[in-house]
Amino acid sequence: MLATTHLLFALILIGWFGLDRKAAFAVLLFGVLIDIDHVLGMAEFVAKEGVENSLNLQAALSSDVQWKSLLHSPQAVLFVAPVVLGFRMVLPLVAWSAHLLMDYVQMNYLGICSPAEMFLMGLMALVLLHMRRAEFSATSGDPSLKGLIVHETTGLATLVSALPVLRSLKKWITPLGSLW
């Protein structure tokens, strides 16, 4: 699956269980960030095939580059299980298992970037949006989508202004909340 789909699933898990930062980090680590091996594979692919093929899906699929590490195989449970025990939580194991299952379904049934995969990603985005809207409605009493968008853009502007490197982007994000 696309990293976006893995991220949406991890965010749904985090929201569904109301995880704290430590647990959320563990879910993101095992549900999404194990795909960092694809970045390393891309570096090897560009070195072998050249930059001109970096966006060519057929060239990437036919290449002999190792795109996935050991973490993408069932044998990785020998690594994941002790780490999960160290975190003293089971959700990282759930996130990792879901990651492997989603990749298996994509490779064997859906295909890479297929309409079915895009539909699944859109469905997960809608579930996450519904969860955020319900949470916002419960805490603020405002059930409108406009209120949620204003709240989220304000939060994003606050986050960006707290990061020194991105502080200049605040002037672009802040007006988004006033569009409504």
Image (cartoon, grey):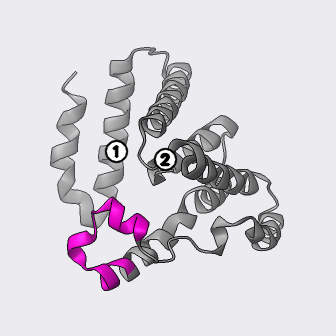
Whether residue 56 is in magenta: the answer is yes
Q: x, y percentage for residue 162?
A: 33, 57
First along the sequence among labels 2 and 1: 2
Front residue of this view, candidates 31 and 99: 99
Quarter of the figure that contains the C terminus:
top left
Q: Residue furthest front?
A: 62
Which amino acid does the dot numbered 1 rest on? Leu
Residue at image position (52%, 42%) is 110
Q: Residues within 10 Å of mark 2 (few under 14, many from 20)?
A: some
Residue matched to label 2: 111
Whether residue 40 is in magenta: the answer is no
- Identify the mark at residue 156; answer none if there is no mark: 1
Q: x, y percentage for residue 84?
A: 78, 64
Residue at image position (34%, 44%) is 156
Report helix, strand or loop for mark 2: loop
Front residue of this view, candidates 53 and 9: 53
Q: x, y percentage for residue 100?
A: 65, 55
Front residue of this view, candidates 178 and 3: 3
Which quadrant of the structure image shows residue 154?
top left
Q: Are marks 2 and 1 in contact (CB under 8 Å)?
A: no
The region drawn magenta spans 45-62
